[in-house]
Image: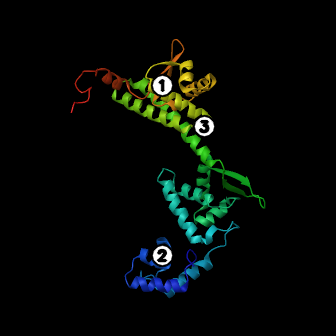
Amino acid sequence: MPGGRLTDDDRRQIADWLAEGLPYAEIARRLGRPTSTISREVARNGAPSGTYLADHARESAGQRARRRRPAGPTEPVADGQQADDVRAFVDEFATLLAATGMPRMTARVFVCLLTAGADGLTSAELVRQLHVSPASVSKSVSSLEAMELVARKADRTSRRKRYVVDDEVWLSAWQADTDAHGRIATAARRGIEIFGAGTPAGDRFDRMGRFFARLSEHMSGSGLAEPVVYDALTVVAALVHAGRPLTQDVLADALDWPGERVAAALHAIEDEPALADPLALQAVAPGGYRLVPRGDRLSGAQCAALGRHRPGDPGSEPAAH
């Protein structure tokens, strides 16, 4: 059965096809299995000499199954997937998380909890499933708890603690990243004050601070209702199209909106500056509004360089064809 455990017939076919020189991918295609299933089978159940023999593979698999300790109660794995496939998935997904900076063992524990049932797993169950030491599991769980990715809950049948992935884990991780980016931006601004604007270090901190401030701002999202956001973007488009300051009454007349709707859109832009990014809404007398470039998009040196290029200067106008 595709996706189930390999049968004795499967192992004989693998041995014959390997003898013919077929690659793992072709064998997997013929058996209707993942290539990783074939490679694991050959690596784990091959003979000591390095060759793959069906009888030896069957005996090795049987001995390993008898040695395997029974796991605690878990929910059945969907679609008939077997334990080997689950372990392979845990390792693959953990590798991806490790590439983002999460320690490898911590990533394996986290993915193992992601694949667990609704009641999560105890430390002992994690040790059995991952074949690692209790100390490794304890250290990883502590790290995950510190990152608020995992929560503890009491076991209903014993005094042991169970570990579960909280339903709000992704929101917590997102908010943690957003807060961290905001702190980096603030620290970078202090760096500019210490090293001085225009110095090599100051310029680097300036670029860093603007980048992380942008990232934090965009990741924080908007709590505004979608219609208000749409109206705010329409007002931004209207001001850009006009190219001059407009009052609330002029905007209401041009857009054919009630004054309250225009006022709500303008307030939304003031409350959520990212809506107008890379521009900023600016109030001008008497009662008008205009859009100007955001001050954190260009460094002082860049503004000065652009200011030196006036209309008529070489390079400021497109060449005639």
Residue 185 in the image, given as x and y percentages of width and height: 48, 32
For the C terminus, the image quarter is top left
Q: Nearer the viewer, residue 225 or 149?
A: 225
Q: Is residue 75 left or right of residue 157?
A: left
Instruction: Using the numbered discs, state the Cα–Cα distance from disc 2 to disc 3 in whole angstroms.
Output: 50 Å
Residue 255 in the image, given as x and y percentages of width and height: 55, 26
Mark 1 or mark 3, whichever is nearer to me: 1
Q: Residue at x 70, y 57 (%)?
A: 162
Mark 2 or mark 3, whichever is nearer to me: 3
Residue named by callout 1: 239
Q: Which kind of residue does numbered mark 2 sit on?
A: Ile
Residue named by callout 2: 38
- Whether residue 79 is visible: yes
- Whether residue 186 is visible: no
Q: Nearer the viewer, residue 50 or 73?
A: 73
Mark 1 or mark 2, whichever is nearer to me: 1
Residue 226's label in the rendered image is 3
Q: Which kind of residue does numbered mark 3 sit on?
A: Glu
Instruction: Using the numbered discs, state the Cα–Cα distance from disc 1 to disc 2 in whole angstroms.
Output: 63 Å
Pointer 1 or 3: first along the chain: 3
The reply to whether dot 1 and dot 2 touch (C-beta < 8 Å) is no
Q: Residue at x 60, y 32 (%)?
A: 228
Residue 198 in the image, given as x and y percentages of width and height: 35, 24
Q: Is residue 194 left or right of residue 124?
A: left
Q: Residues within 10 Å of mark 1 (few under 14, many from 20)?
A: some
Above or below, 15 against 272 in this view is below
Q: Is residue 12 left or right of residue 125?
A: left
Pointer 1 or 2: first along the chain: 2
